[in-house]
Image: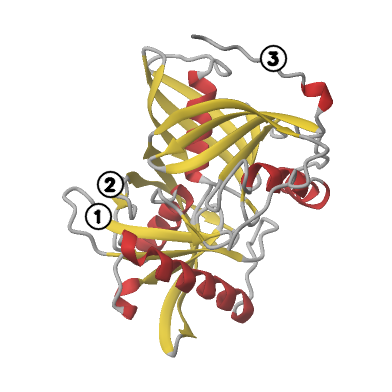
């Protein structure tokens, strides 16, 4: 039996059309319509305008009952940059992000596979305009299906190195690296931990404390963009998985743990490795997440950002559509803007 409901969206406060995806395990809700127009001459200004005036819709789409604690979203807009196909603003249950690798891969996959971008074989190119800058992508397409997406990220650079802080009475050494957002990078061997599913709750608490202390103790200022904080903790360790170089978990938002290896985090890690002479140009770096999924990153070139030596990172991964939906807000719903537990 086929049941076809009719939904009159005129009776709702708002209606959002969205495509849900996962990128090697990490969720992205790609929001196509429903938000009011966003003001701003740059994508950062649009992001800030959204946060100031319409944050209730972020919480409605990210929090329960429409979302969950580790929810992630990508709002597509008209682009500002003339070379871009779409603008994009990334969000989660805690805040907005300037760049996201897994969200980019999910968005590009959804745009191509739903016909919003014309599929060209063997490769389809899509350019996104994010707060951190232009994201150029190249999707491998066969029979209308996206096999993988390679994104050329914004320039990544090692910002500060060999910094220390004290967490739980232990002196922790870390680096700060930029891969679209600022990351605090920590080798978990310092605390005798590895990246495993059973350790994620403890590592999440540690990562959130690290981000808090870094922002209290270190002045952060991107040399060319209005980005003034470390938003994520990248906790890494060695791996015994064949074909993988290293393993990580990225902690961000409101105690969220990335199920993917994190595209911007992979970019930040590549920048740190390259600055330390631990990886060469075009040398594959396979990053493994705590659920065993993988991204492959390479350093494609060198550049500068302000006075910082930087790299051009490329990240490759795959995403899959999990659903297409219209999410509505009933004006009489006392929980219409969502809620959180814990």
Q: Residue at x 60, y 81 (%)?
A: 217
Above or below, 178 against 20 in this view is below
Q: Which residue is mark 1?
A: 245
Q: Residue at x 29, y 62 (%)?
A: 278
What is the quadrant of the C terminus in the image? Answer: bottom right
Q: Earlier in the sequence, mark 2 or mark 1?
A: 1
Q: Which residue is mark 2?
A: 284
Q: Earlier in the sequence, mark 3 or mark 2?
A: 3
Q: Residue at x 19, y 53 (%)?
A: 241
Q: How many marks?
A: 3
- What crowding class fits label 1: few (fewer than 14 Cα within 10 Å), some (14-19), or many (20 or more)? some
In this orientation, which residue lies closer to the viewer: 180 or 91?
91
Q: Residue at x 52, y 38 (%)?
A: 104
Is residue 153 visible in this depiction of the protein? no
Above or below, 49 against 4 in this view is below
Asked if marks 2 and 1 touch (Cβ < 8 Å), the reply is yes
Residue extending farthest to the front is 1
Q: Which residue is mark 3?
A: 6
Q: CA separation, marks 2 and 1?
A: 9 Å
Is residue 214 visible in this depiction of the protein? yes
SS of the residue under disc 2: loop
SS of the residue under disc 1: loop
Question: What colour scheme governs how the chains and residues are painted in the rendered image of this protein?
Answer: secondary structure
């Amino acid at each position: 039996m086929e049941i076809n409901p009719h939904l009159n969206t005129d009776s709702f406060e708002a209606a959002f059309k969205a495509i849900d995806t996962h990128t090697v395990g990490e969720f992205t809700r790609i929001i196509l319509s429903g938000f009011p127009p966003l003001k701003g001459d740059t994508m950062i200004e649009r992001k800030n305008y959204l946060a100031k005036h319409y944050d209730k819709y972020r919480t409605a789409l990210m929090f329960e009952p429409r979302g969950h604690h580790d929810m992630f979203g990508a709002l597509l807009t008209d682009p500002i940059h003339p070379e871009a196909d779409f603008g994009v603003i990334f969000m989660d249950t805690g805040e907005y992000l300037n760049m996201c690798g897994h969200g980019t891969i999910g968005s590009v996959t959804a745009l191509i596979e739903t016909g919003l971008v014309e599929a060209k074989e063997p490769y389809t190119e899509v350019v996104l305009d994010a707060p951190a800058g232009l994201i150029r992508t190249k999707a491998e397409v066969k029979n209308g299906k996206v096999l993988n997406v390679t994104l050329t990220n914004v320039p990544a650079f090692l910002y500060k190195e060999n910094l220390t802080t004290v967490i739980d009475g232990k002196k922790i050494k870390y680096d700060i690296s930029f891969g679209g957002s600022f990351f605090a990078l920590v080798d978990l061997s310092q605390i005798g931990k590895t990246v495993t599913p059973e350790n994620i709750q403890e590592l999440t608490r540690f990562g959130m404390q690290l981000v808090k202390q870094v922002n209290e103790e270190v002045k952060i200022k991107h040399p060319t963009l209005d980005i003034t904080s470390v938003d994520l903790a990248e906790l890494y360790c060695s791996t015994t998985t064949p074909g993988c170089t290293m393993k990580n978990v990225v902690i961000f938002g409101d105690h969220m743990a990335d199920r993917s290896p994190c595209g911007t985090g992979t970019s930040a890690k590549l920048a740190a490795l390259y600055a330390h002479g631990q990886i060469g140009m075009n040398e594959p770096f396979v990053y493994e997440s705590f659920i065993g999924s993988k991204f492959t990153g390479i350093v494609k070139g060198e550049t500068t950002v302000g006075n910082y030596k930087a790299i051009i990172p490329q990240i490759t991964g795959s995403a899959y559509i999990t659903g297409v939906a219209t999410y509505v807000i009933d004006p009489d719903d006392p929980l219409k803007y969502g809620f959180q537990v814990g």
